Amino acid sequence: MTEPTTPTLLVLGAGPKALAVAAKAKVMADLGLPAPRVVAVDTHAVAANWQPIGGWTDGRHRLGTSPEKDVGFPYRGAVHRGTETDVNRGMLAYSWMSFLVEHQTYTEWVDRGRPHPQHNVWARYLTWVADRVELDLRVGRVTEIAADEDTWSLRLADGTEVVGDQLMITGPGSSASSFLDDDRVLSVSRFWDLVPTRDLPASSRAAVVGGGETAGSVLDELVRHDIMTISAIAPGATIYTRGESYFENALFSDPTGWPSMAAAERRDLIRRTDRGVFSVRVQESLLSDHRVHHLQGRVTAARRVEDLVELTLTNDGRGASTQAFDLVVDATGGQPLWFTDLMTPDTLDLIELALGPAASASGPTMTALEESIDSRLAVGSLTPTLFLPNLAGFAQGPGFPNLSCLGELSNRVVRGSLEEAGALGRPRAGVVRR
Ligand SMILES: Cc1cc2nc3c(=O)[nH]c(=O)nc-3n(C[C@H](O)[C@H](O)[C@H](O)COP(=O)(O)OP(=O)(O)OC[C@H]3O[C@@H](n4cnc5c(N)ncnc54)[C@H](O)[C@@H]3O)c2cc1C
């Protein structure tokens, strides 16, 4: 028989996902319901990746998603059956609307047509949530992730260790990498470092490599600079606009029927609506600018030739072509498996064991991990539990890696955390806690 305990849920990264889970745990605890103790660890601060310090934005660009998709959205469902109304009413205290009301800006926001906030305003909202839920935040860069048979431990750069029962990993990893070490090839973080001081290298022919939100923000900034042509390099036949009709949005907000769709349909929908697409707003601002062009291809090589950077672009079934630029931004986005570089060999072994034959000899692969994510948004069969919502899009719903259904994400994660601890009265098979 398993003793119910209050589990400690570690969250690597104090972004929107950490806050959604911490707010849900706070509301549940305030209602006298079992809830995990949430401990977030972040190199910098709450919402760092939405501010210049995180290296993904200068903070002045606008959120692509409506801010009403806040930490409680879609305000449906709950961990314990019968508590839906109380829990979701409690979550409203941490909503975007409550934030505006408290700052006396709600009326103005509505009258201005509900504009999407700048990233730094979104960061202020998330920081306000963190203060209100009294987030247990440890500031420090995680340099090592280790698991034994029933605990996770995060080692920080200053040598301290944070230990918990479960771990949720968030965020896209580092923005500091670029495919060529050259002052005319900028990583995303270098790009945003140079923008505020207007120190971007002078350029007449610029290229931005990547087709997602990261590249969209970079392009949105570059069109404000005096550059003759700007090429958006992405592998698709065109740059797609994010599908934002009711039918597409509904799949992001409510993933109920998602796992029963065919795998090929799910991959196709993610490609069409989420990966390699710009938001409607970014697309509109680029369309009206005659300097912006799309170049199809994957960058497979880059080299400096005198004052220019030559990029080799390849397309399936066609020969490679070479294009030269005097400024290149590598905005291909984060590395989905960035956290595996921090894991100890024993931890990687545990994960490979859980993945079974799907794992490759060189470690857990993206496909094997994505396919293993169960309804808790955790790696199936792995103890101690590892929640990977950023990899849950394919198996559980396209809204889990992004801001589309943070309230549903927190229901799944908190339920998974309590189940493992036996605090829901039905521990998962095979889970034995000391
Ligand atoms: C420019 C840009 C715009 C975007 N706009 C949208 C949008 O409008 N809508 C949308 O749905 N999605 C958007 N996204 C995608 C967005 O990243 C995800 O949707 C999601 O919100 C990220 O939230 P998160 O909680 O997973 O992590 P993040 O908010 O990315 O937080 C991760 C945190 O982890 C910390 N961290 C990283 N490494 C370490 C370490 N080693 N040790 C300790 N801490 C660490 C960072 O400091 C950071 O604070 C955007 C992404 C970018 C780059």
Image (spheres, rainbow, N blue to C red):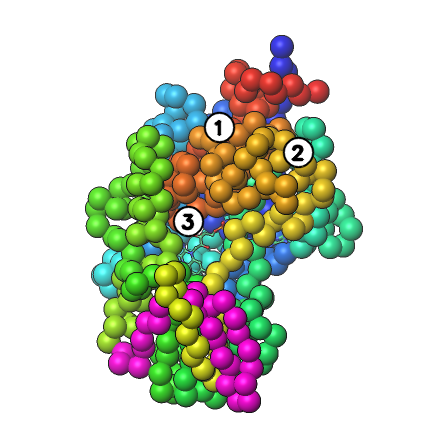
On screen, 168 above or below 429?
Answer: below
Q: Is residue 295 magenta?
A: yes
Tell me the SS state at disc 2: helix
Q: Is residue 113 visible?
A: yes
Disc 3 residue: CB within 8 Å of ligand 1: yes
Q: Chief secondary structure of the magenta span?
A: strand
Of the two numbered discs 1 and 3 on the same chain, state the one appearing first in sequence. 3
Q: Amino acid at mark 2?
A: Leu
Residue 421, image x, y percentages: 59, 23
Residue 281 lies, in percent from the top left, at: 28, 65
What residue sits right under mark 2 in the picture?
Answer: 350
Q: Sequence order check: which comes first, mark 2 or mark 3?
A: 2
- Disc 3 secondary structure class: loop
Q: How many marks?
A: 3
Nearest to viewer (mark 1 / mark 3): 3
Image depth: mark 2 or mark 3 in front:
2
The x and y percentages for residue 216 are 38, 66
Disc 1 to disc 3, how far (Cα)? 20 Å
- The residue under the point 31% across, 46% down is 269
Label 1: which residue? 415
Q: Nearer the viewer, residue 253 or 345?
A: 345
Residue at image position (26%, 81%) is 290
SS label for mark 1: helix
Quarter placement of the C terminus: top right
Residue range corresponding to the magenta coloring: 289-314
Residue 28: in sight, yes or no?
no
Above or below: residue 37 compared with residue 105: above
Q: Does the magenta segment cover residue 278?
A: no
